[in-house]
Image: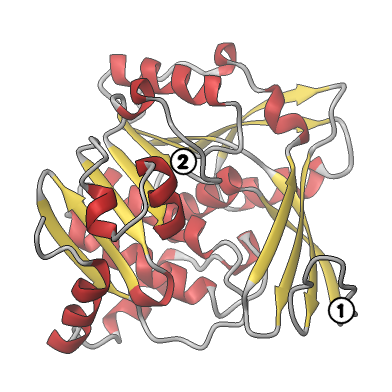
Amino acid sequence: MILVAGSANLDFVVRAPHIPAPGETVLGHDFQTVPGGKGANQAVACARAGGADTHMLLALGHDAYAVPLESSLKAAGVHLHARRVIDRATGTAFICVSDDAENAITVAPGANYALSPADLPPLNGFTHLLMQLEIPLACVLAYAKAARAQGITVVLNAAPACALPAELLALLDVLIVNEGELAVVADAAGSIAQCLARIAVPCVVVTLGHHGCCVRSEGSLSYQPAFDVTPIDTTGAGDTFCGVLVAALSQGQPLQTAMQRGSAAAALACTRLGAQTSIPNQAEVLSFLSAQPPATDARLTELKQFCGLESI
């Protein structure tokens, strides 16, 4: 059973020919509001795409923005531990998605930043705690301490990127980052290999977009090339990967299998619009995986060379 402690945002999404440069106005051609927030996205991915028994700790305002967020989470089968905040609006995000599937996101945290260490529910029965960095860092640290004290596996997706205290890193069992976040957490420039060498977490998962992902776990390296799809919107793909990876681990799947399932779910999410609305169900993920050929030696070699990990 997984507890996700994190953010929930209502996403205001505009599709446009390209993402505006500073000072530029771009005429978009589509607009919609969809449920999002890194925490809520990952909770939906755990439950819907990963098939895991999932709970979520979140904070919402007393406003209309909270309604679609609650509905989406409940529809995915997520059990809610929701704090209601009177003096702050529900979190929102403003997203521009370009015609080539890239995105730019600005988040107004709102109620998400009202969570406190005291809001953590009883941890009896949970095997994994999954968190991100769209809630106060003090909460992330307090929740990690409480989970570690009860023998629960602590997983952090360090996004949005920020420097992390050594005290928090020491509490983590699994750290999930993209390439840019890896450099920030490692406080170093250089190759993925060089950055990984600076992070003292037992298992570090690095997502690499269309290249795939790599994992360093207790000194052993694993690689998963990305699956070939034609993307239309990458919003929420990383969150989908995180949720499905943790769901698979909570079900006792090997790390390599968890990487494959996470990558497959993220690939499918890229072929659909929105954050939570793009997350596939578990049957779709397993069907997609069963139709994929094994990764070729050439793809694996390319990924290893991109990572520069042979020397670790």
Looking at the picture, how far across and down is residue 105, in whole percent? 70, 58
Residue type at mark 2 is Thr
Residue depicted at 22% across the width and 84% down the height: 299
| 93 relative to 122 in the view: left or right | right
Residue bearing the label numbered 1? 28
- Sequence-wise, the earlier of marks 1 and 2 is 1
Label 1: few (<14), some (14–19) or many (≥20) C-alpha neighbours in 10 Å: some
| Labels 1 and 2 touching (C-beta < 8 A) | no
Specify how the rendered protein is coloured.
secondary structure
Specify whether residue 50 is in view.
no
Depth order, front residue of 137/36: 137
Depth order, front residue of 114/192: 192
Against 125, is 269 above or below?
below
Looking at the picture, how far across and down is residue 200, in whole percent? 23, 35
Point out which mark residue 54 bears: 2
Looking at the picture, how far across and down is residue 17, in whole percent? 77, 85
